[in-house]
Image (cartoon, helix red, strand yellow):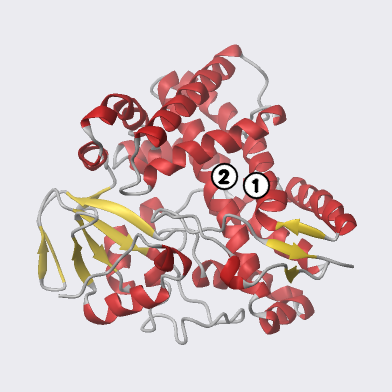
Amino acid sequence: MATYDMGDEAFFSDPAPTFASMRENDPLFWHEQLDAWVLTRYSDVRQLVRDSRFSVDRRQRIRRSSTDSERRILADCYDFMSRWMIFADPPRHTRLRGVIGQAFTPAAARNYEEFVWRTVSTLLDAARRRGSLDVIADLAVPVTSLTNAKLIGLPQEWISDISRWSDAIFRLFNPGAYSSTLAHSAHANLKECQDRMREYLESGSDAEDGSIIATLRTGLDTGSIEDVDEAIASCVMFMVGGHESARHMIGNGVLALLLNRDEMMKLKTSPGLIDKAMDELLRYDSPSVCILRRASENVMINDREIAAGQYVYGALWSANRDPTAFPHPDQLILDRPRQQHLALGLGAHFCVGAPLARIQLSAAVRGLLRINPRLGVAESELRRVPSLASRGLERLPVYVSG
């Protein structure tokens, strides 16, 4: 039986060969190392993310993945995160999304366009004077952190803390990555973040109309948000999710253009292509690798039974490279005919922040096209974040001019 290493540097650098082999030979594969099934074909992953027989609650798996020495402090982390909307099933998920979704409508997202563009322009003006920048550290991280702070309704002075908290907490989502150092770091950062959020939320400090904090305070008043703990959990969820996903989205999208200069020139000469281009960049190198679900009952997929209680990784990245859904899937084609990619999920758990994330990606790409970016190192020197939850770059140095 074939084996597939989904935890080595070669896989993180380029998962395409591994996923292509799995789609062809083992589209539903029991992965001993992950102690879970892995689904890789577009049609199967699409079914998984829409199927109500699969739960997003992962508490049982996380706890059994930790060792006894780590269990005590990790329990605090996972009990808290179990209140996140993304780990809730209906009806709780429906209630939370109904409240919080008010801050994420396309119309609400458009209110951030000027702020995001101004932030991108300021950062790129500084880069142009220097002649270079790291797209991750000098653009993606500050843009997403500043936008996140404004969206949630937090002081701009928290920017460095938002980045630090998000990085530490998000590492908990990498399967098999539990260690004493990671556990203690995640726990300490999460507790600090919770305490600061609680103090700020309860202080009555002004929060911008339409911000998440303002929306949650209204929810507390009307009873649609259960208690302050649920409000704090929602703030932390959006802080972590918005920071990680959006910054990797920017880094992956920019790198794809740098490595496909004909397509980059196509976008530069045809700026009206930007909306289609955003979808293709998301499909081509998705910021999410896999999502995790738990079968709440026995489910048949591809004539094989997934037993109740077993976990399934839905490989979004692989689904977006499935040739049965996307002709020539390993090519970046910015004017590709539209087909629904899965980079941002689907159905009830479609990324609620998608409109704002697209605004950030679009602004970053449009801004960089104005200053003629060129990759500053060989592609082989770039390092990917080692994670099955998200796919991103540790750094992306480029030279700029113009």
Q: Is residue 225 left or right of residue 278?
A: left
Q: Residue at x 49, y 55 (%)?
A: 385
Q: Is residue 264 above or below residue 364?
A: below
Viewer-side residue, 20 vs 303: 20
Residue at the limit of the structure toward the top, as seen here: 203
Question: Which residue is painted at 48% across and 81% down in the image?
Answer: 330
Q: Quadrant of residue 34?
A: bottom left
| Residue to which mark 1 is pinned | 141
User: Who's the residue at 80% across and 50% down the image?
Assistant: 123
Mark yes or no: residue 69 visible.
yes
* Rendered location of residue 104, percent (x, y): 56, 45
Q: Which mark is residue 269?
A: none
Locate residue 182, reporting x and y percent: 41, 36
- Would residue 157 appear left or right of 231 to someone viewing this image? right
Residue 231 in view (yes/no): no
Label 2 sits on what residue type? His
Identity, as a three-letter code, of the amino acid under mark 1: Val
Please state, as top left, top right, bottom left or bottom right, where the N terminus lies in the image. bottom left
Say if mark 2 contacts mark 1, CB within 8 Å. yes
Note whether 335 is above or below 106 in the view shown: below
Please tell me how crowded label 1 is: few (under 14), some (14-19), or many (20+) other residues with Cα within 10 Å: many
Residue 196 pos. (x, y %): 55, 20
Left or right: residue 176 versus residue 191 is left
> Disc 2 versus disc 1: distance between alpha carbons?
7 Å
Residue at disc 2, secondary structure: helix
Q: Residue 243's mark?
A: 2
Q: Nearer the viewer, residue 321 or 43?
A: 321
Name the residue at 20% across, 68% down.
Answer: 29
Q: Earlier in the sequence, mark 2 or mark 1?
A: 1
Residue 288: name its quadrant.
Answer: bottom left
Graded by Cα atoms within 10 Å as few (under 14), some (14 to 19) or many (20 or more), the crowding at tag 2 reads many
